[in-house]
Image: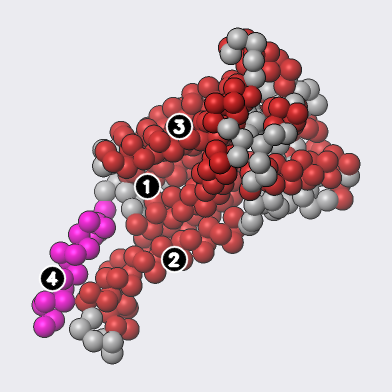
Amino acid sequence: MRRSGLELSSALAVVTLIAALAMAESLGLGLHDPDGSIGHTFVLLPLIVLVALVLDVLPRAIMRADSWRALRPAVTEVWRDRWPAANLRFMLVGLVGWYVTYASVRNLKGFVPFANQELYDRELSRIDFAMFGGQSPAVLLHELLGTTIAAHVLSFFYVVWIVALPASLAVALVWARRDRVSTWWVTAVSVDWVIGVALNYALPTLGPVYDRPGDFARLSDTMTSALQQSMWTERLQVLADPAHTNTVQNIAAFASLHVAIATTACLVAQRAGLHRSFVWVLRAFLAVTIVATVYFGWHYVSDVIAGLLLGFVGAWVGERFAAPDRVREVEVSELGAADLAGRGARQ
């Protein structure tokens, strides 16, 4: 049988769904849409994939067509060339599998306060203060970077993640179809999510912004501060009446998944031999993410360190398990040559 490279990510989707259903049943709770605060991923992800499909097919069709009248048959021709049944099946398996894992993990994360009522914020705060000479690392960053312009800049890059992650999956599933790098990335992200939620249960925390809100009172109002307030409100609603709410609480700080997935992205890009400039952009994004996650109090420094380690594990597991059989298809880099050749032949 031909391997797709998505076997592990598909298995994780099944396992996490079963785990979420079992946990919901044991706690007497239900499964809900996990994106109340930040928009619906089940809508956003297919839309991004649809845009990626259009950008994959339409430019090629335009280059092949010698007139507007010929554009429609050119689109049909490109679609048949680029998207046979095997490629469509690969994309749909990857898309559905990742979303099932994501939604299941987010619900499992929401169940943490009911499954483990301990909180370890005090212990992680002590570690932070010990590492930084008795001072809060977040307050040190506020003094170093300021609390106005830096807050808005870091907030922008932090919130960009909401679109960047599903967009990266669209690129992997559409433009890098059935390629080792694409399956590696999709699998690694799923691994990060699954191990991350296990750590949420092992070491439940709120994060500095909720444990010590006074440390962050001087920050300017940003998209991030609004998101933090929204998430806290949702948590209070869920804890007050868990059986009669459609909201999923999403506060569980250890480990930092933002840092983990950004680390995984850097490692996958580097080890896959992608262009050096792209690797350095990802490294810069990781650095900004680390600073932002401490600056806004999402995570303790211990969460960041754990996120870095988790990112290494996700990339390693993805590399070992996501190796599809090679298939013959036109690469993205061949767009110009292949389509110009096709157009010239018809002329």
Question: For numbered disc 3, what is the local secondary structure?
Answer: helix
Residue on which disc 3 sits: 287
The mark that comes first in sequence, 4 or 2, is: 2
Query: Which residue was labeled with disc 4?
Result: 341
Write the residue at 46% across / 53% down.
167
Q: Residue lying at the far bottom in this picture: please name it.
A: 69
Q: Secondary structure at mark 2?
A: helix
Dot 3 amino acid type: Ala
The amino acid at mark 1 is Ser
> How many numbered markers are drawn?
4
Magenta stretch, residue numbers: 327-347
Q: Is residue 188 above or below residue 52?
A: above
| Residue 191 is one of the magenta-drawn residues | no
Amino acid at the residue labelled 4: Ala
The residue under the point 75% across, 30% down is: 213
Q: Which residue is mark 2?
A: 51
> Between residues 272 and 280, which one lies in front from this camera angle?
280
- Report the disc number at residue 182: 1
Q: In the figure, is residue 63 to the left or right of 251?
A: left
